[in-house]
């Protein structure tokens, strides 16, 4: 699997490695279409207010085709920018998190969430409530490895927002100072195409806001976004170190509206009916004279 896909997969699993308490003994409803190509692309990669999207977009684009579904998950193929096709499976399986308490966790990349799952008629709504009501350490403990390596994080919150259009999973955190190698190591795992993006050695006032959005109608992953506001220092030079990353579903632009012919305008529009009346009148007079 390519580094770009690993990066995208890890980001999604970081936010959504959790699920809803419910036995799978009823109908599961999926809102996406099988045998349809869904294209996911890099929307923004801005560092130091410089957008690197055009340089990386082609190498990070992937095409997803769901091949079939069942009561507990789905199979799909991933085609990367080199046209390498990789089959994948995502299953929602029960995991015991405490004695007698089970959560259905997505095993694999959660490209889509079910609309209904087991006895839960509104899976996305229940999923959002689960996020809001579950201890943060339980949700991130097994997913975000060694979070203390990021620095002295003084604030962190994971929550959801559910609207008629999207289910949003959100992660906010703040660290007065970031460990020097944290972002450098993360960027080393992401193929930047040899662009030489410079990461500060000292990062302070580190504020991160991450959002994952799922379409409330289809359950399909729509976009992932990270916004970082911080101060960076390198070689004695201090500047704002801001990063914006957005990766999501390609939506073709709407077709242009149909054009309607513009009526020909004249400076004296009243001349046209008068001219017609004059021609008709002349014909009548001519016929009378001829008699």
Image (cartoon, grey):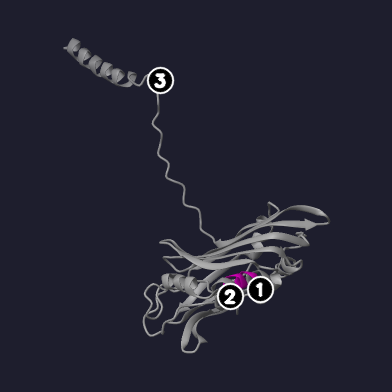
Residue 98 percent across, percent down from the top left: 51, 86
Residue 64: x and y, percent? 54, 70
Q: Residue at point 42% right, 44% down?
A: 258
Mark 2, Cα crowd under 10 Å, few <14 / some 14-19 / many 20+, is some
Q: Circle 1 sits on which residue?
A: 147
In which quadrant is the N terminus drawn? bottom right
Q: Is residue 236 magenta?
A: no
Give the image location of residue 248, x and y in percent: 56, 62
| Residue farthest along the top direction in this orientation | 289
Which label sits on residue 140?
Answer: 2
Picture quadrant of residue 186: bottom right
User: Helix, strand, or loop for circle 2?
Assistant: helix
Pointers 2 and 1 in contact (CB under 8 A)?
yes
Label 3, label 2: how many angstroms apart (C-alpha)? 73 Å
Q: In which quadrant will I find the C terminus?
A: top left
Can residue 35 be seen by looking at this rendering? no
Can you name the residue that lies furthest to the right here? 235
Residue 211's disc is none
- The residue indicated by pointer 3 is 267
Label 3 crowding class (10 Å Cα cut-off): few <14, some 14-19, many 20+?
few
- Foreground mark, 3 or 2, reads 2
Q: CA distance from mark 2 to mark 1?
A: 9 Å
**Residue appearing at x 49%, y 84% in the figure:** 93
The residue lying at 45 percent from left, 82 percent from top is: 72
- Identify the mark nearer the N-term, 2 or 1: 2
Magenta stretch in the rendered image: 7-13
């Amino acid at each position: 699997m390519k580094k770009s896909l690993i990066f995208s997969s890890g980001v999604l699993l970081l936010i959504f490695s959790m699920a809803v308490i419910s036995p799978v003994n009823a109908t599961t409803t999926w809102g996406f279409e099988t045998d349809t190509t869904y294209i996911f692309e890099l929307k923004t990669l801005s560092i130091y207010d410089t957008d690197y999207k055009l340089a990386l977009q082609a190498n990070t684009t992937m095409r997803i085709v769901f091949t079939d579904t069942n009561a507990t998950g789905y199979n799909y193929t991933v085609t990367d920018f080199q046209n390498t096709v990789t089959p994948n499976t995502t299953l929602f399986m029960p995991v015991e998190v405490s004695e007698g308490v089970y959560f259905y966790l997505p095993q694999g990349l959660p490209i889509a969430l079910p609309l209904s799952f087991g006895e839960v008629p509104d899976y996305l709504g229940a999923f959002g409530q689960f996020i809001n009501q579950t201890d943060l350490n339980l949700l991130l403990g097994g997913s975000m490895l060694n979070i203390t390596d990021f620095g002295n994080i003084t604030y962190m919150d994971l929550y959801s927002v559910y609207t008629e259009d999207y289910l949003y999973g959100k992660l906010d955190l703040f660290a007065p100072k970031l460990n020097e190698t944290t972002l450098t190591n993360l960027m080393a795992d992401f193929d930047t195409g040899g662009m030489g993006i410079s990461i500060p050695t000292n990062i302070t006032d580190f504020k991160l806001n991450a959002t994952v959005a799922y379409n409330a109608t289809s359950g399909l992953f729509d976009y992932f976004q990270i916004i970082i506001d911080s101060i960076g220092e390198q070689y004695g030079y201090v500047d704002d170190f801001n990063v914006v990353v957005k990766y999501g579903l390609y939506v073709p632009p709407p077709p242009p509206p149909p054009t309607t012919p513009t009526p020909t305008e004249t400076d004296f529009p009243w001349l046209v009916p008068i001219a017609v009346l004059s021609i008709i009148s002349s014909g009548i007079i001519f016929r009378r004279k001829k008699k």
